[in-house]
Amino acid sequence: MDIGDVNTQALAAALRGLDAQRQAHEANLSNIETPGYKARVVSFQDSLGRAIRSGDPSRAAITTTKSTAPTRIDGNNVKIDGEVLDLQRNALQQQLVTEALNSHFRRIRAALGR
């Protein structure tokens, strides 16, 4: 989806990556008592940085892997403290990116005199 300039595309790609991370954290928390469950880890920041430097943020890849962190006796490796903290950090990052997009669109509206 092409939605404007490189900055807008980068912010949209960041939102997609942050949304994938949020979903993974929620799934991890939902499965905290599931024996054998391995926490999901979502990465997109490095790929987004490379895509931005190349001039095409839409090429940023979102990668989901299973955590290799040590497991408990039941084979589950979800750490509630880390997941809750990461989920809160993710929410703040989503707010920041959303505000950046809103600010960008407010400037466009102002430039158009609306």
Image: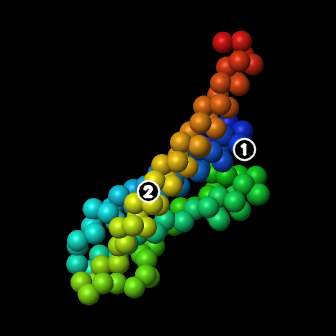
Q: Is residue 2 above or below residue 13?
A: above
The residue under label 1 is which amino acid type?
Answer: Val
Q: CA distance from mark 2 to mark 1?
A: 27 Å
Q: Are marks 2 and 1 in contact (CB under 8 Å)?
A: no
For the C terminus, the quadrant is top right
* Residue 36 in the figure: left or right of residue 110: left
Can residue 23 be seen from the camera position used here? yes
Tell me which residue sits at (40%, 60%) in the image. 84
Neighbor class of circle 1 (other Cα within 10 Å; few <14, some 14-19, many 20+) is: some
The residue under label 2 is which amino acid type?
Answer: Leu
Spot the residue most to the front.
81
Residue on which disc 1 sits: 6
Judging depth in this view, the residue of 106 and 60 nearest the camera is: 106
Q: Which mark is residue 87?
A: 2
- Mark 2 element type: helix
Spot the residue most to the top.
113
- Mark 1 element type: helix
